[in-house]
Image (cartoon, grey):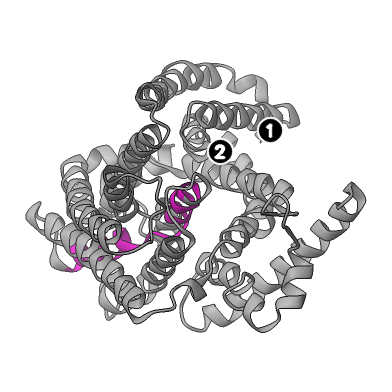
Amino acid sequence: MNNLHLSVQFFFQVGVILLTCRLVGAIARRFGQPQVVAEMIAGVLLGPSLLGLFWPGFQAWLFPWDPAQKIRDTQSYLYPASQMGLALYMFVVGMEFRADIVRKRLRSSLAVSMAGMVAPFVLGAALGWLFFRYTHLFPPRTKLSEATIFMGASMCVTAFPMLARIIHFKNLSGTTMGTVALGSGAINDAAAWCLLAIVLASFDNHWSQALVNIGGGAAYVAFTLLVVRPLLARWKGLIVKTGTLTESGLVIALALMIFGAWFTEYIGLHAVFGAFVMGAAMPRGVVTRDLIGRIQPLTVAVLLPLFFTYSGLNTKIGLLNTGFLWLMCGAVLVAAFLGKGVACWLAARATGISNREAMGIGILMNARGLMELIIINIGLQRGIISGGLFAVLVIMAVVSTLIASPFFERSVLSGAYQPAAEPEIEEAAVSG
């Protein structure tokens, strides 16, 4: 396919993707689902699981396949475009992250995070052992230790970006529920990335790479928060004029985000990690307000749906073609719900949080969404998991995220319940 044909194909694809996401979103809103859930579903619908099943000719024309390279012709540009969307989105999430509210409820956040890691990891590792021994869901090259750790990490992860959006949308910022869920989700995802780094190092038989991943990530966080953040705060007057972020300030912020994403991708972590940390380092107030206002609309409306579609193109639900495989899929769902939701609810209750708020925390932590898709896409690309297991984990990610919002509405926000805000946090929010 020549460059002109590729560009023509790309623009048409983006148009189809955006319209499909909005159409599914309009239907999803009737069932109380946020747009991000609709985009996850739309991505699967545009892939071989639905469009390719009923209209294979159109699907093959829309997303052509190169049999020589065994990749889609559009992968060369759809993938990097989707990664840029992810990085920008996590940059925005980082700017909205409030470290002060995490410190306020650090004990509860740590307890919930620990429960949300240990229980699902144990259940996921057990399923990884089962799949490795009795199915072909892992390729022959994958070792037993890699299979168990990868499945454990997949179960541990929380949909941190979606978590932030739900908390903001439900006006839970600064509440006990929102504070603990955000803090726990951040810690969970950091641990899941470390586990993934270990799996990738083992898979490549290059253990020193795991040290580079984890050590380099820690060094990046320290440099960004201890060096870059103070410098940005000192130079704030140079990039803000008449109460507005300048064009130069916008370019500098985006360049820092891109270099941060490049570095964490380069050392073997994911670009989203670098983008999130750089977002957390941005000066609060006018800078973050204007950055979010300029970046978020295009990112959420155009770039992020590309990632969900890219994931959907790799999802082949038809590979689950036996009753046993569907039984295993059910086992993954049960383990996901019990390991994450119930464990986080019990941990929250043990630290003195009310039953209703603890239930809300468990439901929110159980959504896996975007971060789950990132991890399993890495696993598929590196050959750690098969297409069949990828489909199982996509189903788990979609279903666990799908039920989060309605369960939360009916179980937590029903009736006259009003979540109590943390007075000191709200005061900090006003002053910041």
Give the residue at x 30% y 71%: 328
Q: Nearer the viewer, residue 72 or 368?
A: 72
Where residue 173 appears, as percent x and y from the top left, is: 37, 53
Give the residue at x 37% y 46%: 142
The quarter in which the C terminus is drawn is top left
**Residue type at numbered disc 1:** Leu
For label 2, the residue is 288
Residue 15 image-quadrant placement: bottom right
- Dot 1: what SS? helix
Give the residue at x 25% y 67%: 337
Is residue 99 rendered to the left or right of residue 42?
Answer: left
Where residue 326 appears, as percent x and y from the top left, is: 35, 77
Seen from this angle, which residue lies furthest front? 140
Whether 26 is among the magenta residues is no
Residue 419 in view (yes/no): no
Q: What type of secondary structure mainly makes up the magenta span?
A: helix
Residue 295 in view (yes/no): yes
Where residue 307 appears, as percent x and y from the top left, is: 60, 55
**Residue type at numbered disc 2:** Thr
- Circle 1: is it few (<14), some (14-19), or many (20+) Cα within 10 Å? some
For label 1, the residue is 250
Q: Answer above or below: position of 430 versus 220.
A: below
Q: Nearer the viewer, residue 193 or 275?
A: 193
Question: Which is more N-terminal, label 1 or label 2?
Answer: 1
Whether 375 is among the magenta residues is yes
Specify start and end residues of the magenta stretch as a single range. 356-379
Q: Nearer the viewer, residue 394 or 326?
A: 326
Is residue 317 rendered to the left or right of residue 147?
Answer: right
Where residue 349 appears, as percent x and y from the top left, is: 11, 59
Q: Answer above or below: position of 417 versus 275.
A: below
